[in-house]
Image (cartoon, rainbow, N blue to C red):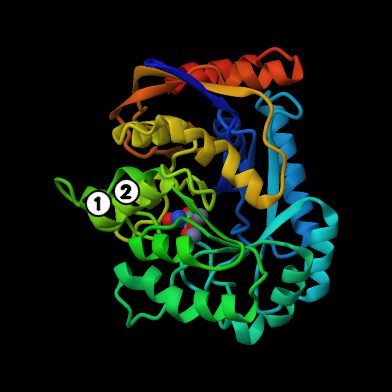
Amino acid sequence: MQSTPDTLTIIRPDDWHLHLRDGAVLDSVVADTARQFARAIIMPNLKPPVTTTELAVAYRDRIGLALERAGIPQGAFTPLMTLYLTDNTSAAEVKRASQSGAVHGIKLYPAGATTNSDAGVTDLLGRCAAALEAMQVAGMPLLVHGEVTDPAIDLFDREAVFIDRVMIPLRRAFPELKVVFEHLTTRDGVDYVRQAEGPVAATITAHHLLYNRNALFQGGIRPHWYCLPVLKREQHRLALLEAATSGAGRFFLGTDSAPHPKGLKEHACGCAGCYTALHAMELYATAFDSVGRLDALEAFASLNGPAFYGLPVNQGTLTLLRQPYRIPAELPMAETTVVPLAAGESLGWKVATAVAAACALSDQPMHPDLSARTKQTGH
Ligand SMILES: NC(=O)N[C@@H](CC(=O)O)C(=O)O
Ligand SMILES: [Zn+2]
Ligand SMILES: [Zn+2]
């Protein structure tokens, strides 16, 4: 890490929780991500979900073509694929996934918990024991959307109850299984991850570090702040910020950037998900700077994740400049429009050399299309 009062240069970061989607929007979303991150864990909640190694490899190839179309130099961005765990995931499928080298985690969506989770698991220990056993043996991480779906449980308590009902029994049954508690949102979650025995870690989003639940209702109902797990009280935000900036190796960056078309967010029954791939590092830098801990950003963004996943640290760097940066009001994506989180607001940090660094890595010039889009989005 190198820093002056107005610049911060860190090892190129990774995003350990990302929704790239598929089809026409993929080109834009992958270009936004590759401008900042060298790798990302790609969530499998497509329609239909990515449940087999074969589907994951095919999705990886589509991402590869989108990278090419966006002019991202070969090797500058690597998608790390995941499988969607279902009641029917077999031990043989886990073995195939692990031997493929393409799949780096298997994702647990409790059935009905979030966007595209209808095919999710109904009873983790009852239905998935063989798959979990095979994952434990193979060292394949289980990535967890940690919320119970019991309608009797208050929305804001679903993560805390998940710890008691699912995490603790799971860890007891499979103590050596690597588990990532994704998009952690509560003090309860932070305390659990800190104290749990065995290989447990957590990702934290930029929005849960920057906002509490008041953001959802400031001046009226604001659908672009709605994600799952939902934003929580200020005391939870403070616990997350303390964990992220503590340097503790169990906490690392995962944006959970999840684009939805503007019309499906601004809707009587709006979709859950915030789009942050465009300005993720600016948001995280703003959060770390708010508590004077920019020195801890590199461990959180670039070191702790690879250590947990057993992958090398990236080459190349990313530089942030202390400069006002206005987040665009909306982003045209294929036939649709996506509103980024905190659209129209200003941040105090701006990514300087992400594209330059990525291009330097593979000695290729920046693609003209990318520079055009860069201008258009104010990046
Ligand atoms: N986070 C969200 O609110 N939405 C995600 C799904 C998820 O990560 O739960 C999505 O795919 O839209
Ligand atoms: Zn989730
Ligand atoms: Zn997600």
Classify 10 Å Cα crowding around label 2: few (below 14), some (14-19), many (20 and above): many
**Vertical arrangement, residue 132 with respect to residue 4, above or below:** below
Q: Position of residue 268 (x, y in %)?
A: 29, 59
Which of the labelled discs sits on residue 216, or is there none?
1
Q: Secondary structure at mark 2?
A: helix
Decide if residue 117 is in sight here: yes
Q: Position of residue 358 (x, y in %)?
A: 65, 22
Q: Position of residue 364 (x, y in %)?
A: 74, 15
Which of the labelled discs sits on residue 27, or is there none?
none
Q: 68 or 189: nearer the eye?
A: 189
View extreme (left): residue: 219
| Mark closer to the chain start, 2 or 1 | 1
Q: CA distance from mark 2 to mark 1?
A: 5 Å
Which residue is located at x 54 percent, y 35 percent? 334
Which residue is located at x 26 percent, y 51 percent? 212
Which residue is located at x 73 percent, y 76 percent? 133
Q: 335 or 2: nearer the eye?
A: 2
* Quarter of the image where one finds residue 127: bottom right
* Quarter of the image where one finds residue 14: top right
Q: Position of residue 87 (x, y in %)?
A: 65, 79
At label 1, the amino acid type is: Leu
Instruction: Describe residue 2's horizontal placement relative to residue 238 as left or right.
Output: right
Which residue carries the number 2 mark? 225
Q: 129 or 220: nearer the eye?
A: 129
At label 2, the amino acid type is: Trp
